[in-house]
């Protein structure tokens, strides 16, 4: 049984992403007795995308094709770029030269499976984690058995869809590190991807936190499923030896919690002495100097605190479980241990005002991170507390969730946004050692922001999305 796994992600901001998730699927399929190869389209251009798919599918002649949808879009207000056009072009290229069934999956797909299947014209999809689902599908196709028992399977039934419960890897110890995928060396070329190329690795799946806008609990589950420290070390060692990778990005939504697990991973890394470094997303809860000193000894170079806000009111509105005092304490600990610090803000959420933004920037002044990233507008996804709140208030019931739908609080009109931009300029001038990076164009914000609480981004860069005039998800916004 031959399966071709296609990674369609070509997004390059904020960084290139090695398709490690697809590599896990390949390992699971091969361990189950099937053949599996990966087609990574990250470095293909618009002009070469379809030809690359046609050539590989024709040469390999798969019995099953799995297409990964990592992101619906780039989640960036006023610099919007959709990705589903690429996926549709890939599916059409596969169907043109191969009769094998095409199944769509991935983290983005699991959020809106019916909507994405409709717009792509696909017949099969997998909701949830792919390893058990793809193995079950391959087993069924190889034996000629019906597909009914595949976990997470969604398929068309007349005018509607039939969906099995989401696929989950209940035992994280069964997650076997990729052993057969050799990443494209361009992922680790400083000339290609910039000065800090990394390989992404997860130490856990799921998230027990409740940030109001975050879809991770819906995709991966609402509890942490922890991989063993030994498995993490073995995977890093394997990737280091296979591809010469010495810098990793721990892509957990939060690395440092549960604290005991983070300590276990770091102690294992210290003992293994792999000669690698890493960065991670972090929550400012439960920090002390001993913890950050351990992180540094284990190879941590950068901690990215995904704070979203530094105002007590906005931390509460976004359902954050930490305080301003936690932010400042964790920052001091990380700085004393010698790590670079990134603080990330997400402005414009429920209850945001000029005053709350000013409070947030005051907190950032006291923390003085090395890098401060500022996003504006929250990409709205179904199955999140924010969307539930919006619909409960009688708004957005008829919204097409595949459109570039962003939440910007209704209190933030053009005048308020101009004041916020001036506050950011003042912060930048007063904190010259902080590298401020905005992921939106200030002039576009002033021109485009309206007074509605639900904003549709009407502008965007040229992007690389394939044009399809039937649906906005298939063309640049």
Image (spheres, rainbow, N blue to C red):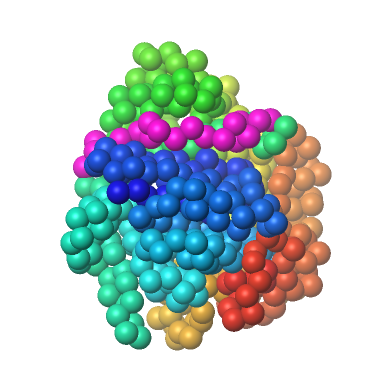
- Left or right: residue 40 versus residue 193 is left
Residue 238 lies, in percent from the top left, at 41, 24
Residue 171 lies, in percent from the top left, at 21, 42
Residue 394 lies, in percent from the top left, at 45, 86
- Residue occupying image coordinates x 40% and y 52%: 62
The quarter in which the C terminus is drawn is bottom right
- Residue occupying image coordinates x 58% and y 72%: 473
Instruction: Magenta stretch: give its range.
Output: 171-190
Residue 249 visible in the displayed image? no
**Which one is in front, 177 or 53?**
53
- Left or right: residue 232 versus residue 348 is left
Question: Residue 376, relative to residue 208: is it above or below?
Answer: below
Residue 29 lies, in percent from the top left, at 30, 44
Question: Residue 36, relative to residue 148: is it above or below?
Answer: above
Does the stretch in magenta take in 265?
no
**Which one is in front, 81 or 184?**
184
- Left or right: residue 263 versus residue 402 is left
Is the stretch drawn in magenta largely helix, strand or loop? loop
- Residue occupying image coordinates x 31% and y 32%: 261
Does the stretch in magenta take in 183?
yes
- Residue occupying image coordinates x 72% and y 66%: 460
Exactly how many numbered labels are in the figure? Answer: 0
Residue 194 visible in the displayed image? yes
**Which one is in front, 269 or 386?**
269
């Amino acid at each position: 049984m031959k399966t071709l796994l296609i990674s369609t992600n070509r997004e390059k901001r904020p960084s290139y992403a090695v398709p490690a998730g697809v590599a896990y699927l390949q390992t699971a399929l091969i361990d189950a007795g099937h053949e599996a190869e990966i087609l990574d389209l990250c470095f293909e251009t618009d002009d070469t995308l379809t030809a690359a798919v046609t050539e590989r599918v024709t040469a390999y002649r798969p019995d099953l094709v799995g297409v990964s949808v990592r992101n619906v879009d780039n989640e960036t207000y006023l610099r919007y770029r959709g990705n589903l056009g690429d996926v549709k072009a890939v599916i059409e290229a596969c169907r043109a030269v191969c009769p094998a069934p095409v199944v769509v999956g991935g983290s983005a797909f699991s959020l809106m499976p019916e909507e994405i299947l409709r717009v792509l014209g696909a017949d099969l999809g997998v909701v949830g984690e792919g390893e058990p689902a793809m193995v079950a599908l391959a087993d069924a196709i190889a034996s000629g058995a019906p597909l009914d028992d595949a976990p997470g399977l969604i398929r068309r039934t007349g005018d509607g869809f039939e969906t099995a419960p989401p696929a989950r890897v209940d035992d994280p110890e069964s997650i076997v590190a990729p052993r057969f995928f050799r990443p494209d060396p361009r992922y680790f070329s400083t000339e290609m991807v910039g000065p800090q190329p990394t390989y992404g690795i997860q130490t856990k799946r799921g998230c027990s936190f409740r940030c109001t806008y975050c879809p991770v609990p819906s995709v991966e589950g609402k509890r942490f499923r922890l991989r063993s420290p030994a498995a993490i070390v073995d995977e890093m060692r394997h990737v280091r030896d296979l591809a010469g990778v010495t810098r990793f990005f721990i892509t957990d939504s939060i690395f440092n919690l549960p604290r005991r697990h983070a300590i276990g991973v770091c102690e294992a890394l210290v003992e293994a002495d792999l000669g690698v470094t890493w960065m991670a997303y972090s929550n400012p809860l439960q920090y002390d100097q001993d913890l950050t000193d351990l992180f540094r000894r284990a190879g941590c170079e950068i901690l990215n605190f995904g704070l979203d806000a530094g105002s007590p009111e906005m931390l509460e509105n976004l359902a954050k479980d930490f305080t301003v005092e936690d932010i400042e304490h964790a920052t001091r600990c990380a700085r004393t241990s010698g790590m670079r610090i990134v603080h990330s803000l997400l402005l414009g959420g429920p209850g945001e005002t000029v005053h709350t933004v000013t409070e947030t920037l005051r907190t950032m002044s006291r923390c003085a991170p090395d890098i401060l990233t500022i996003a504006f507008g929250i990409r709205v996804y179904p199955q999140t507390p924010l969307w539930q709140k919006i619909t409960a208030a009688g708004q957005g019931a008829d919204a097409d969730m595949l459109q570039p739908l962003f939440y910007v609080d209704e209190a933030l009109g053009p005048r308020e946004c101009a004041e916020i931009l001036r506050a950011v300029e003042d912060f930048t001038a007063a904190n010259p050692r902080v590298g401020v990076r905005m992921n939106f164009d200030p002039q576009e914000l002033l021109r485009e922001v309206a007074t509605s609480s639900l904003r549709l981004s009407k502008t965007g860069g040229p992007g690389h999305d394939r044009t399809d005039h039937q649906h906005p998800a298939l063309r640049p916004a």
